[in-house]
Image: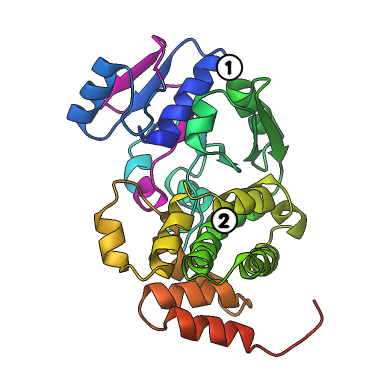
Amino acid sequence: MIGAGAWGTALAIQAVRAGAAAVALWARDPARAAAIAAARENPRLPGARLGDQIRVTAELPQTAAAFLIATPLQHMRAIAVRLPADAPMICCAKGIEAGTLRLPLEILAELHPTVPAAVLTGPNFAREIAAGQPAATVVASADPALRVQIADLLATDMFRIYGNHDPIGAQVGGAAKNVIAIAAGAVIGAGLGENARAGLITRGLAEMARLATALGGRAETVMGLSGLGDLLLTCTSPTSRNYSLGLALGRGEALADILAARTTVAEGVATAPALVARAGGVDMPICRAVADWLRDRTTLTRAIAELLARPRRDE
């Protein structure tokens, strides 16, 4: 497990629950790795005990049945390039890389073109997975054997894994939902009401479907767990990092102050401009409004007015 944040730690716990005899949980900082190993608990996931099967280390493992990469997407390249190309790599992060505008599996394909790869994505909060509460997720890959392999490594009765052969659609859903969640939080933070949030989520889903199909994915994928499911979770829970960031922005807090006070990453901040750039001419007014707002090119009031002033048409 590459990345000892809350999500990586939760997946390590889940792998043990699914029967793994040994899991290496990698943390970039040696001091942090040592502290987690000594406490048998990650402070980012309080109350979730690490079993004896989990070895916490600051040295990148050089052999594994599979590498599950749960680092923030913007840092994945620097770490993935150091992994040996002799085991499947599963990206458990969501977003689009700033600068290159690549999706997660495109980064892995560039770094390790011969290595089988998949993306694990869906409506999953780390604390609930670590606690063993019921959840469902998606492993998306063009390789059916790899989908089965990863499901065998992680699935239990309480953690249901669905395979999907459309990794493009699955990755678009995981990236775009964080951007839309910022908008959903801002709507509630600004006191605009539940009707406005419901409308925004629904139209945001349409944007996700348009982008997925434009990039070669399927609209049907966006209607599943990796799209609609993840969107609903991220746009409605105050514990969502992206939604809570939008909530604070909608209440008038400055983006720099919000980010400075956090130790966790809201992927939607970096993803928004990259997503809009990757979308090109695809019609994505909500995502474009978020990207402009985060870069101080518009205000929340003006963005809402422009969205509401768009020409009327059939749904």
In this rendering, the answer to whether 135 lies above or below 73 is: above
- Residue 262, percent across and down? 29, 50
User: Residue most toward the right?
Assistant: 314
Judging depth in this view, the residue of 203 and 29 nearest the camera is 203
User: Residue most toward the left?
Assistant: 31
Q: State the residue at coordinates (28%, 23%).
A: 36
In this rendering, the answer to whether 220 lies above or below 20 is: below
Judging depth in this view, the residue of 299 and 283 nearest the camera is 299
Number of numbered discs overlaid on the protein picture: 2
Which numbered circle lies on residue 235? 2
Q: Please state which amino acid type lies under the numbered disc 1.
A: Ala
Which numbered circle lies on residue 18? 1
Q: Give the position of the N terminus as an image quadrant.
A: top left
Judging depth in this view, the residue of 82 and 310 nearest the camera is 310
278 to the left or right of 265:
right
Which numbered circle lies on residue 136? none
Distance between the alpha carbons at the discs numbered 1 and 2: 29 Å
Q: Which residues are magenta?
A: 49-77
Q: State the residue at coordinates (41%, 59%).
A: 245
Q: Please state which amino acid type lies under the numbered disc 2.
A: Cys
Choose mark 1 or mark 2, whichever is in front.
Answer: 2
